[in-house]
Amino acid sequence: MTNNTSHNPLFQITGLSHSFGGLKAVSHFGLTLKPGEIWGLIGPNGAGKTTVFNLITGVYKADEGTVTLGGVDLTGLPSHAIAASGVSRTFQNIRLFKSMTVLDNVRTAGYCRLDYSLASALVRTAAFREKEERLRQSAIEVLTVLGLAHRIHEPASSMPYGLQRTIELARALVNKPKVLLLDEPGAGMNPSEIEKLAATILWVRDNLGVAVVLIEHRMQLVMKLCEQVKVLNFGETIFQGKPGDLAKDETVVKAYFGEDHDAFVN
Amino acid sequence: MKRKLALFLLFSAGLTCALCCDFLRLLDPYVAQILMYIGINIIMTASLNLVNGYMGEFSVGHAAFMAVGAYTASFFSISVFTHGPAPVVFFPLSLFAGGGAAALVGLLIAIPAFKARDDYLAIITLALIMITKSVFENIPWFGGPAGYSGIQKYTSLSWVFVCAAATVVVVRNLVNSNFGRGIIAVRDDEVVANLVSVDTKRVKVLAFVISAFFAGIGGGLFAHLIQFINPRTFSIIKSTDFLLMLYLGGSGTLVGPILGAGIWTILLELLRFLGIWRFAVAPVALIMLMIYRPRGIMGGKVLN
């Protein structure tokens, strides 16, 4: 756990809304994160969870609402600038750079950290080589921590499914983000892989001090990791609180099971 | 370090050979001509590779950049440097001007490339070819449709060698840098590239501008080799030649363009005895190759 006892919010989202045509995909979404917190974002399919991530990272432009990180307004910035300022994410369907090796996938995400000029890259100056070497080292460091040290030169597309998810995580971590957005990291994993994933996410939080927002359908993972959860349904936030209280909340149960059910099974 | 030394020695040896051939006239002029064509084609194909290979776009506008380079460089050596310095001094400046002008056009084409990809970008670059052709046909100063003559033969094996080596080295160093990883990331998944902090607009501009710059240099060398250019020289057919060489050798590889340019140029010369039929035989050879090695001769291999 981080020792940061300050109650200053690290990451703050207020009133985020977006519609596709007439359809309100997300309305008035708000979230306040402190360093090291893990929030879960759950809800039925099509509830707007991934849309929230896309709004935060600038894939879509929000109709209204603001996103700030450490007091800096990120609203309306291009995606690469948002990523550079410390918000990293992974994807629901794995989206690695398929033609690259594992190492290059991670190094590519270090783009914003390298500030050498084009000219120094073209003649390979000493400064260029030193900065490249430093990025290479930190990429290897992240990959080592995640247990991929011996496979860094293999093509990313040839790796097994679970490891591809790990590479995505490494790619999201190489810039030492302050906020990590994980979009269904446990999808397609078996229970023992889920256990390992949970341990990894906790390790990342404890050692790198990042705040995590987790979209997840696997309640096993949500219960284990999240201190707080938010439930979305049709773009509206219908619940916010401790994961243990989910089953007691009537609106949540209705959203998942309809009117007739009175039991929430996880 | 050893590799660096080997590359340097290779470069020096090549340059010495080229200089000897130029000054002592060791080579048959016909052979020298073919070698220079190969060199120019390497420049064109390697620079095209940056956009069509590494960045995965489909640009067919390379002939337009070549035309801009050819006309600008010729203009500079005919009309700007008339009473000035010796050709050895001003010829590289003319080439540079040609490259610079082509790079400016490359910058213009990069802007629609922010929005359009694949087929749409191909059509935009096709339009670029038509526009440049019409522009040069309607500038009387450049001879209009009749062509631009009076260009001196300044292109020599040494110049071609230096420019081709520079192109290959620049492409290699670019690809092995942050910018190059960004360019390849755009090919693999542009949205994700942006989300992992790659400034995709910037790397696109870079790829187009650098690619166009070297195409302009190639155009300048070409003009000062054949000493007469007209707008029809730089039609879509010219672009197709470079596309052929690129996909023959293997796009997205460093050695592919060199192999492709060399093999295609030599093949067309070797088949000369067939007369007009060579234009039927050579494409058939290409079709066979695409069937048996669809990713080009170097396809799938990474050789730095």
Image (cartoon, rainbow, N blue to C red):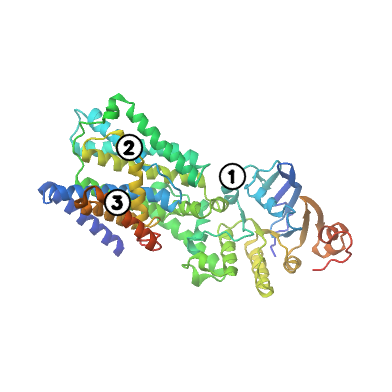
Provide the chain ID for the residue under circle 2.
B
Residue under label 3, please give it: B280
* Res B255 visible: yes
Q: Secondary structure at mark 1?
A: loop
Q: Dot 3: what SS?
A: helix
The residue indicated by pointer 2 is: B67
Cα gap from disc 1 to disc 2, whole angstroms: 36 Å
* Tags 3 and 1 both on a single chain: no
Residue A126 drawn above or below residue A66:
below
Q: Amino acid at mark 3?
A: Ala
Amino acid type, residue under disc 2 in the picture: Ala
Report the side of A147 relative to A22 (left or right): left
Mark 3 or mark 2: whose residue is earlier in sequence: 2
Mark 1 is surrounded, within 10 Å at the Cα level, by few (under 14), some (14 to 19) or many (20 or more) other residues, namely some
Front in this rendered view, residue B297 or A116: B297
Residue depicted at x 65% and y 43%: A61
User: Label 2: few (<14), some or many (≥20) within 10 Å?
Assistant: many
- Around disc 3, counting alpha carbons within 10 Å, would you say few (fewer than 14), some (14 to 19), or many (20 or more)? few
Q: Chain of mark 3?
A: B
Q: Position of residue A131 (x, y in %)?
A: 45, 56
In the image, B103 versus A198, the foreground residue is B103
Distance of mark 3 from mark 1, alpha carbons?
50 Å
Q: Position of residue B40 (x, y in %)?
A: 27, 47
- What label sits on residue A233 in the rendered view? none
Q: Is residue B173 left or right of residue A94?
A: left
Question: Would you identify the image quadrant in which residue B216 lies?
Answer: top left
